[in-house]
Amino acid sequence: PEPRGGVTVLTFTQQRHGQTSRRPPALRCEEAPTLRPCLMQGEDTRLPGLPRYVRINTLKLGAKAADRALLESGYRRAADAADAGKRSYHCDEDVPDLLVFKPKGKSDISRLPLVATGEVVVQQKASCFPALALAPPPGAVVIDGCAAPGNKTSHLAMLMENRGRVLAFDMNERRCALLRERMALKGASIVSARHASFLSAAPADPEYAGVTHVLLDPSCSSSGMSLDPITEPAALAELASNQRALLLHAMAFPGVTAIVYSTCSVNE
């Protein structure tokens, strides 16, 4: 089965000529620090048998150069998924610059030299849609409110051609340090990693006056992706409350024209 979840795109029209758009006030609330460790530790419990995906990082490498390097590593490009060869890959039909490999156990893409150099990124297909849906143009000012470990963050920088600014927030110090390392590896020079809660960013602060796009991929139950999701009712209620707070806070930034909210949860 394919992983399930959701990507919601909110767009706003800024009113002018003396009128102001009405936005919900920011809530005084914090992300749930008690829930993050359970999403950071333990075994990989994602649904088995899924293809493995590699996104070409066009900040450092083009598609033809990626093909040549993969051929040197023993992988060859196939026309489509029907190719039975274990060491073959093909281009995804939906996501630009995304390559599709055989499932775990039939391919070993994590050991590719291109991964170690940041020239390609091991990233699930579903994880690519939030940045594509937000589609910030080069030169934009973007907030990634729940950024670490940074696959979506680097994807934003790539789509923006490293022009503009990406303000990337994460509350966890270790994850934020990892975010900085990965952005440097991937050449995402427009990303500014911030060890702080997105909710601490004041929408009225002049620093954020130019923000037009916000990406929110908050902690969730992982019920659409994991064999061992969070199911305890109190924990689910806490997650839902914090997700709502983040979304309403994003709406409070005066210049925002688009917000993407995504989770890999199917809880209602």
Image (cartoon, helix red, strand yellow):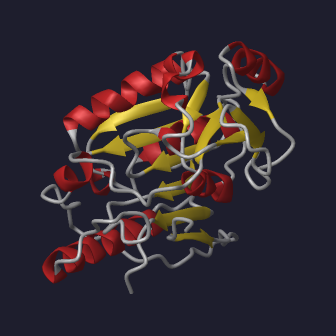
| Residue at (61, 21) in percent of width and height | 119
Q: Relative to 70, say whether 214 is above or below.
A: below
Residue 90 lies, in percent from the top left, at 77, 41
Which residue does the image show at 57% across and 60% down from the upper left? Answer: 256
Q: Nearer the viewer, residue 36 or 222?
A: 222
Q: Whole-percent x and y of residue 127?
A: 54, 53
Left/right of residue 186 with respect to residue 205 in the rendered view: right
Residue 97 visible in the shown view: no
Number of marks drawn: 0
User: Which corner quadrant of the image does residue 182 belong to?
Assistant: top left
**Pick the front one: 162 or 40:** 40
From the viewer's perspective, is 127 left or right of 30?
A: right
Residue at x-position 82% and y-position 47%: 80
Residue 42 position, x and y percent, is 21, 47
Question: Which of the image's four quarters has the N terminus?
Answer: bottom right
Name the residue furthest right: 79
Left or right: residue 189 compared with residue 140: left
Q: Quadrant of residue 32?
A: bottom left
